[in-house]
Image: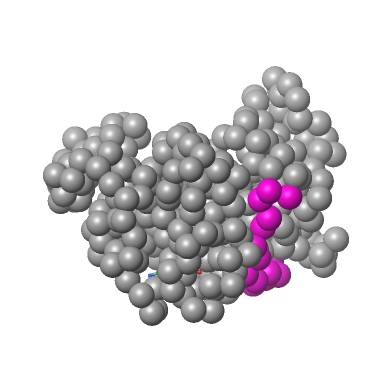
Amino acid sequence: MKAFAIDAYKAPLKLRELPEPVARAGEVIVSIEAASVNPIDVKVASGAFKAILPYDMPLVLGHDLAGIVTAVGPGVSHAKVGDAVIACAGGDGIGTFAERIAIAETDIAKKPSNLDMTEAASLPLVALTAWQVLVERAQIKPGQRILIHAGSGGVGTVAIQLAKHLGAYVATTVSTSNVELARSLGADVIIDYLMESFDHIMTDYDVVLHTLDDKVLERSLRVLKPGGKLISISGPPDPAFAKAIGANWIVRQILKLTSAGIRRKARQQGIDYSFLFMRSDGGQLAEIARLAEAGIIRPVIDQVFAFEDAPAALDRSASGRARGKIVVRGHGSALRPEA
Ligand SMILES: NC(=O)c1ccc[n+]([C@@H]2O[C@H](COP(=O)([O-])OP(=O)(O)OC[C@H]3O[C@@H](n4cnc5c(N)ncnc54)[C@H](OP(=O)(O)O)[C@@H]3O)[C@@H](O)[C@H]2O)c1
């Protein structure tokens, strides 16, 4: 089958012919119709995560997919051939910039029936991230105040909608050209970061979802009240994360040191700092699919690239300017246009 893979970290992404995937126990084969791009794909390719997420080469990039189940392995209990599904490939099985993938049945969910393959593929990784931050970690309650940074990004566009659904009062940071987008997603307070400093305006927030750099992370402490939660998905990883991934002693010490400053400053203000790294979860994805079917979460698509232009799609993600999600589609030898 055709797949976009790298031979080594920092090597160019190349279209290659790779062996067909085989479904092991508990896995299904999905014929991929669309895959969305995430900043993690660029980071994985650069080797940024090699100490904590070692991958074998050649490595097929891409986490998110929408497609059709074409075969089921032994012990698969619910999925059937012909099911339209979405998934975020987990574990060491990443590789959705490919015609087909073998993926655990526990990672997939039915595709929302009201979304096409492009829209459906845009959701899994960012929506699971938003779910795990807002529902699991922050345990958002109606009326709580949350600041979501980069409301126009892949995570931000979904997190705003999910936080509103959970009854939160939602503030977000965007640039001037994305103010209307943030409004249309339901944000209550929109800070144009080119014109205003969020930390000069906002106080007494319960939660900040941090997606940006270390400077914004530190400034975010100022908007939280004592007892508030600063949840970062863009680093620095903390000791709890190191423990959760079973990191070795050296990696644990490095992560302890690199997060020491923000953990100390947060502690001094009575704020809980934590880093979250999302995981695949078909059960949560099914909940998200239901919200999409109910029109509560609407995908925001930045740009759609043909499968053969996957490297350009990655470059677009690396620009850091995507407005919503970048999707690659037309996988498969037919390289078919949008269904
Ligand atoms: N830990 C995890 O499990 C996890 C999961 C998902 C994502 N992440 C990380 O979270 C980060 C965000 O992911 P993403 O998918 O949302 O990224 P993305 O879609 O690439 O984000 C791009 C958006 O960020 C906005 N932006 C850039 N600088 C900004 C600033 N200073 N203030 C406000 N908005 C700004 C851009 O808007 P303008 O062009 O208008 O500036 C653009 O719309 C990435 O670092 C990603 O690797 C981590």
What residue is drawn where x is 71% and y is 39%? 290
Q: Nearer the viewer, residue 24 or 121?
A: 121
> At 67% across and 36% down in the image, what residue appears?
286
The picture places residue 226, in percent across and down from the top left corner, at: 25, 42
* Colour pattern: one colour
Instruction: Assess whether residue 297 is covered by the magenta stretch.
Output: yes
The quarter of the picture showing ligand 1? bottom left
* Residue 18 in view of the camera: no
Is residue 15 located in the magenta-colored stretch of the structure?
Answer: no
Write the start and end of the magenta stretch as one range: 295-310
Q: Give residue 27's quadrant in the image.
A: top right
Q: Is residue 262 above or below residue 198?
A: above
Residue 212: percent from left, percent from top: 36, 62
Total marks shown come to 0
The image shows residue 33, relative to residue 241, as above or below, that is below
At x 81%, y 31%, the residue is: 80
Residue sitting at x 48%, y 37%: 141
| Side (left or right) of 264 relative to 1 | left
Estimate the x, y position of residue 247 in percent, counting from the top left: 28, 36
Left or right of 183? Residue 335 is right
